[in-house]
Image: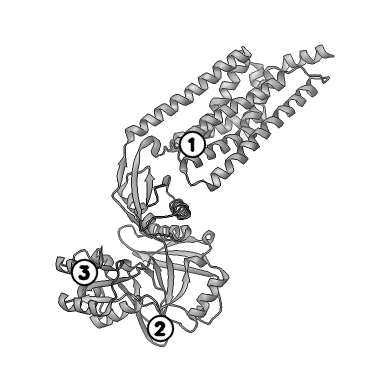
Amino acid sequence: MSAVIDLLHDRQIQMLLVLVALSLLIVAVNGVHLGIDFVGGTRIPLTASAPMDQDQINDVLAKLQSRTSSFGLKEVKVRAVGNTEIYVEVAESDSSLLEQIQRIVKEKGTYEGLVDGKVAITNKGIYPGTIRTSTTKVGQYAQWKVEFVVTPEASQQFADTAKGKAHKPLYMFLDRPTDSIVVISRADLVSGTSLSEAEALDLAQKALTREDKTIPVFVLDDWASVKNEINGSVAITNKSTAIISTEAPAEVKKGLTGLGFKITEIEPAKLSPTYSLQTSPTEPYRFVNRWDAVGLLSAPALGSTVTDGTPSSGYLIEGTSQGTDPVTAANTEGRFIASILTGGALPVELTAGSTTTIPAPLGAEFLKWSVVAAIAALAGIVALIALRYRTMKIILPIIFVSVVEMIILVAIIGSFTIDLGGMAGIIAALGVSVDAQIVVTDELLKHSSMKGSAKGAKAKMNKAFSIVVTNAVVAIVAMIPLLLFSNLVEIIGFATSTILGAILGVLITRPAYGAIVEKLFEKEIEEDAEAEQ
C-alpha cells in the first residue's frame, strides 16, 4: 500500500492519471465520433467532364479534401474510382449538410473579379492561408465577408485594371459560365425592381460582359423571334449551354436542345438578378449586385481609394443573407466561398450524381471485429508477458499502461473521427507500447555492473529510454510522409494514430511505466546492487 501511495506522489504518474481523467471526461461529454467504416454514411459520386491523368486526379483529390476540411466538416473521404469518377463519402445523412457538401465539391472553383469587362483579379493570385471570414448582423439581414491577401503581381494587375473606375462595380464571380447564354423571362428579369425591361436587360448584359467571353442575355417573349435571334448571333458548339428557368415552357427547352444547347435549369428565384440602385456624390449609378444563376457573388462599388492606381494587398468579397436565421445563412455562405477559394480551382468540371447510402450494418460489423481485434491483441500481449516474466508485479502495470494508452488515444482521435485506418493505428500503437515497456523492464532488471542502487537504476533507465525515444523518432519519421503526401484517408488515419501513440508514449506513458516498475522493484534493485558490492 505504501508503494502505491508513493507512486501517487510521482509527477509522471500524476500526469498520466490527469490525462486519463480528461480523456474519460471528453468521451463522456462529446462521445466518440466514428467514421463511415463503422457507422455507415452517404456517398456522393462525381463524374469528370473528361478522363483525368494521375496528376489531375491527385490535384482534384487534394483540392476537394482541402475544401471540405476548411468548411469544418467532421469526416469526408475523397477517393478516385478509375480516371473519370470521384467518390465523396461522409458519415452523415442530414439533408442540409449533404446539400452543402454537394455544393462545395461540384464547383470548379474559378474565381474572378471583373471591372468594365476586364479581369482585375483571379484566385490564382490569392494566398490561401490568408483567407478569413466574418459575419455581422445588420437589422433583419446578416452581412458576410471573405477577406484575403493577394500576391504583388495580382495586386498590381488589380490596381492597373481599376484605375480611374471609381463608383464602378467590381463583379465578383465564382465559376462564371463559359460558352453559355441566358434565356430569361421578362418577369424574372425585372423581379423585385422598378427598372424597365430595357434598363434591366442593359444592366444584366453589362454584368456578363467580358472582353473575350461575353454571355449574351435573351428575354423570352415570343419563342420564334428569340430562336431566330439566337441563331443569328450565337456560335453554337457541342459545349454550348443555355441557362433557363425550371418553369420555362417545354417548347423552349425542346427548341434550345434542338439548336444544340445543353440545358441548365435554374429556380426562378436564383435566375432573377438583384440590382443595386445607388447615388454617388456626382451621379446615380446602377448595376447587378448578385446573380446566382451565373455565379455572381457580389458587386461592391469601387471607392476612390482603390482606383488611384496604387497597389493594395488586401481585398474582400461580401454579401448579405436574410431569412428566418440570417446569421447562420451568412456564416454558411462565407464559409462556402472561403472553402472554394482555399481549395483552388479544379482542373476539370465535376458533375454530381445521385447520392447512395452506405449501410450502417456493414459498418457495425467492422466496428465489432475491430473491438474484437483490439481485445485479442491485448489478451495475446498478456499471455506473452505472463510467459516471459511470470509475475503480476510486471503483468499488471503493463496491462494498466496499455489500457490507459488506448483510452487516451481513443479520446483524442475520437474527438475528430475514428475510421478503420485510425483503429488499426491504435491497435498498432498498443503493440509498440508493450514493446517499449518490455525494453524498460528488461533494462531495469538486468544485473548492473555499477555500484550503488540509485546510480545503477538511473543508468539502466537512461539506457532504456534512449532506446524507446529512438524507436519513437523512427516511427514518427516513417509516418510523416504518409501523413503529408498521401491522399488516402485510411492511410492518413493510420499514420495519425501511430504518430500520436509514439508522442504520447515518449512524453507520458513510458516514463509513467518506468516509475511504476522502478518503485515496485526498488527492493530487488537494492539487493542486486548490494550483492555486487
Badge 2 amino acid: Ser
Query: For mark 3, does the 10 Å Cα neighbourhood hold few (<14), some (14 to 19), or many (20 or more) residues?
Result: some
Badge 1 amino acid: Gly
Query: For mark 2, does the 10 Å Cα neighbourhood hold few (<14), some (14 to 19), or many (20 or more) residues?
Result: few
Q: Residue shown at 53%/61% (left/top)? A: 130
SS at circle 2: loop
Q: Earlier in the sequence, mark 2 or mark 3?
A: 3
Q: Residue furthest bottom?
A: 282
Task: Give the spatial CA distance, label 2 vs label 3.
Answer: 41 Å
* Relative vertical location of residue 199 with respect to residue 294 in this rendering, above or below: below
Q: Quadrant of residue 317?
A: bottom left
Q: Residue at label 3?
A: 256
Q: Residue at label 2?
A: 280
Quarter of the image with the N terminus is top right
Task: Give the spatial CA distance, label 1 vs label 2.
Answer: 59 Å
- Residue 290's label in the rendered image is none
* Relative vertical location of residue 319 with respect to residue 482 in this rendering, above or below: below
SS at circle 1: helix
Picture coordinates of residue 218 (x, y %)?
Answer: 24, 76
* Relative vertical location of residue 520 with respect to residue 48 in this rendering, above or below: above
Residue 328 in view, yes or no: no
Q: Earlier in the sequence, mark 1 or mark 2?
A: 2
* Relative vertical location of residue 220 with respect to residue 365 in this rendering, above or below: below
SS at circle 3: helix
Say which of 493 and 226 sits in front: 226
Residue 425 in view, yes or no: yes
Q: What is the count of numbered marks?
A: 3
Badge 3 amino acid: Leu
Q: Are marks 1 and 3 in contact (CB under 8 Å)?
A: no
